[in-house]
Image (spheres, rainbow, N blue to C red):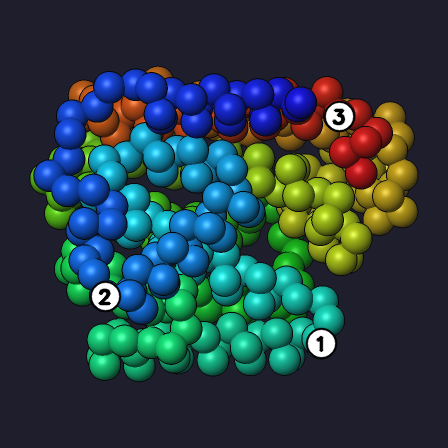
Amino acid sequence: MTATDERTSQVQQTAVTTPARPPAKSSWAVIGNDRTLRAAYRHCRQLTREQDRAEYALIQLLPAALRPACWALWAAANAIDDLADDRTVPPPERAARVEQWITALERELMTGTSTDLVRHALVDTSQRWRLDLSELHDAMTLVRDDAHGRRFADWSAWRSWGRGNLLPWFDQVRELFDKAGTPVALRLDTQEVYEEFLDGVRLTDILTDLSADLAQGDLLLPDDALDRYPKAAGDLADLRWSPAVSSLITHLSGLARRWVTQPALTRGMHPGPATILNTMADLLRAQLDAIVAAGPTLL
């Protein structure tokens, strides 16, 4: 068992055993008896549990009534990522499929239903919690453009891409908490801390998926970082572990660890959301421990 798996298991156990304030309704009671709708949310829950155990464990820490909405949001983000990453079709077709998904969602938000299980749950989440999903449009179009490949000259360009992709989805979860009566307001002096935390989330994700991305010809790191270790980019392209690659991974893992360790982020925050963020940071640090420990097997 890796450090990440062990920490995830601990979080899952905590989610089961830690007493929490009883929500007004269970997950399924909130959804109601509509069989199609229940099937849609069940599908989203299954996708989350099977494809991202850590995220599923975090969602289990939420009040039960909020979990279906988070399953739907995660499944939607994952759906368009999968379309953009599908290497069985050429980049223009991948981008077109993401665009079709986005267009279908915008149409279905008007009609209130969808034949696609993930979008059906997402549309219901939008209506049920009065979420403005139009705020996700730019983030989703960034994913569409990812289908054509990415190259970042510097950290500034990398941050703009990463924050543009992640921030709107995280803001939807913050809005969900607000609508449920648990505000997650950020002080003005913590906005940059919050966004830097998301930089750490993105960098940890990239390092975790490095082998899979390289196999597809993607290297989602800025030239600024690669230039510090001149041979690293070529070695990574050849899937070859080398001293330059080792030094690069050590440097980036340390940077990600610093970014996700932000005590000021939860200062003054409601204890519920603060616990979620602190646990998320613990999981990310466990992932980074596993990345460093993996050494050559990371590739």
Classify mark 1: residues with Cα within 10 Å, few (<14), some (14-19) or many (20+).
few
**Residue 245: image location, x then y, percent:** 81, 32
Amino acid type for the residue under numbered disc 2: Asp
Q: In whole angstroms, how far apart are the C-alphas of marks 3 and 2?
A: 46 Å
Quarter residue 115 falls in: bottom left
Q: Residue at x 20, y 42 (%)?
A: 26
Does 102 sit left or right of 267 as displayed? right
Does 75 sit left or right of 240 as displayed? left
**Residue 254: image location, x then y, percent:** 61, 22
- Relative to 195, say whether 189 is above or below: above
For disc 1, the marked residue is: 90
For disc 2, the marked residue is: 34
- Relative to 3, say whether 79 is above or below: below
- Relative to 91, say whether 257 is above or below: above
- Relative to 293, say whether 249 is above or below: below
For disc 3, the marked residue is: 294
**Residue 257: image location, x then y, percent:** 54, 23
Amino acid type for the residue under numbered disc 1: Pro
Residue in the foreground of this view, choosing between 70 and 260 = 70
Task: Look at the numbered disc 1 and give the secondary structure of its residue.
Answer: loop
Q: Residue at x 57, y 40 (%)?
A: 205
- Report if the CB atoms under discs 3 and 1 are less than 8 Å apart: no
Amino acid type for the residue under numbered disc 3: Ala
- Circle nearer the N terminus (3, 2): 2
**Residue 63: image location, x then y, percent:** 23, 35
